[in-house]
Image (cartoon, rainbow, N blue to C red):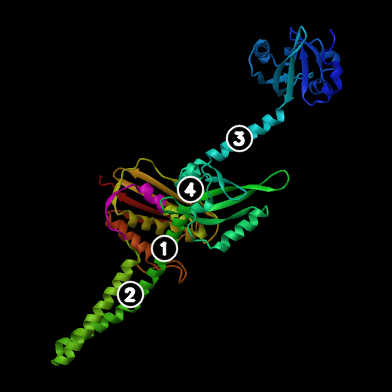
Amino acid sequence: MPVPLSRYGRVFDLLPEMIFILDGDQRIIDHNKAASTESGFSEEEINGMKITDIVVREYRESLARLIRSDALQRRVEIPLLKADGTSFDASVDLKILKTGEDLYHIVIARDITEQKRKELDLLRFSNVIHNTVNPIQITDAKGVMVYVNPAFEKTSGYAKEELIGRNPNILNSGRHPRAFWQKVWNEILAGKVWVGEVENKRKDGLIIHTELVISPIIDSRGKVVGFLGAHRDITEQKALEQQLIRSQRMESIGTLAAGIAHEVGNPLTSISSLVQVILRTTQDEFAKEKLELIKNQINRITRIIRDLVDFSRPSNYIIKATDINEVLRDALNIVQYGKKVKHIDFDVDLLPSLPKLQVVPDQLVQVFINILMNAVDALDGSPGTIVLQTLQKDKQLYVIVRDSGKGIEESELEKVFEPFYSTKEVGKGTGLGLWVSYGIVKNFGGDIVVESVPGKGSIFTVSLPVKGE
């Protein structure tokens, strides 16, 4: 049978797609050079083969049915076979050619293996971006948002419909000056990656802190066509850092208050005693009047000192059913953000489903912050381990804090819970932390005991009674 398009063979062979011409029995009677080159079959091998011979077995019948059908849209993606037995993905278009009384089927196939690979990569990346817990936004080159993932919606408080088409400054808290953002734009427009911390505002007005990485999206010509912004929500971390700063500040105030109470309180007591003696012995009304004024001012100063000491360890004093594990996690979160814990491993083993305790949560958090900070200080900046563990025995809950620090000398063990006593260097501790902690635990009907071996570490065990909820 003559080749129906032989006189157009030159143009036919210049086309990059694989083209096969089939007779009514779906046999190949002609093909272009690309068909032979891409498939690996020689020109002699291809002619006379059925088109289904170069299709992966499980797809052969579906292709044969499609060729026989009268469907208007006859395009399919199927894997084709090469002469060496390997396969590749192909996009196949089916056409009909009539020449006089003869009817031919034209099969035009294009290798889409690379396209499929890119689509799969894109699908993987899009799934990662869409499902990651980190807020992600993508903008065009002008900074207009074209995509946000669910985590971004959750963090910002806006629905994606409210964000797409808008500029990210919808989240602007106003805390960063114009010069800050100008510097950011200068870097990313130059094709550089920008990393920094930003303070934004949610839809409900709450402030959120995020660590932001902005990566330029660059096309094949090197032109910036958009930006990908990946956020990491550090709002809670910032809050914990502030709590730690406040805790350290309160310790400083405690040091000041203790100093004032000691250095000023004793002379005031002496002055007050002298004033009372003179008041009882003098008959001079003018002197009595002035001495009463002095007495009132002394009492005022005494109240100020007492209030300052109380302020250094505030609490809401509300007793309620409290999960001891939550208290320990709160204390641990605060301590772990300190600069001294960089080389410390925390081994946390909290027994689940512990009964709740009737305590003041704020006070108990302060107790374990003090104990954990002492454990951190005992390591003195060296690598080490702090173990935090909870146990239950009968009607007692036990919290064990074990460190691998320098330990405490036996002669000092009995003094660690005394006020103003500290094993730390002068200026590095108030001597009040364990004393206050001991008093708080005793008020709840519990106890604190300490065991230590110099050079090997210390173990603080806090026991608290279970009194029912």
Q: Quadrant of residue 278?
A: bottom left
Q: Nearer the viewer, mark 3 or mark 2?
A: 3
Q: Position of residue 421 (x, y in %)?
A: 39, 68
Residue carrying label 4:
347
Q: Earlier in the sequence, mark 2 or mark 1?
A: 1
Residue carrying label 2:
261
| Separation of marks 2 and 1 at Cα, in angstroms | 21 Å
Q: Amino acid at mark 4?
A: Asp
Q: Earlier in the sequence, mark 2 or mark 4?
A: 2
Residue farthest to the front, as pictured: 100
Q: Position of residue 268 (x, y in %)?
A: 28, 81
Count residues near mark 4 (Cα–Cα under 10 Å), then give few for <14, some for 14-19, many for 20+.
few
Q: Which residues are magenta?
A: 315-330
Q: Position of residue 275 (x, y in %)?
A: 21, 85
Q: Nearer the viewer, mark 1 or mark 3?
A: 3
| Separation of marks 3 and 2 at Cα, in angstroms | 65 Å
Q: Earlier in the sequence, mark 1 or mark 3?
A: 3
Residue carrying label 3:
124
Q: Earlier in the sequence, mark 3 or mark 4?
A: 3
Quadrant in the picture for the N terminus: top right
Mark 2 element type: helix
- Examine the rendering and report whether any part of residue 198 can be seen: yes
Residue 221 drawn in magenta: no
Residue carrying label 1:
246
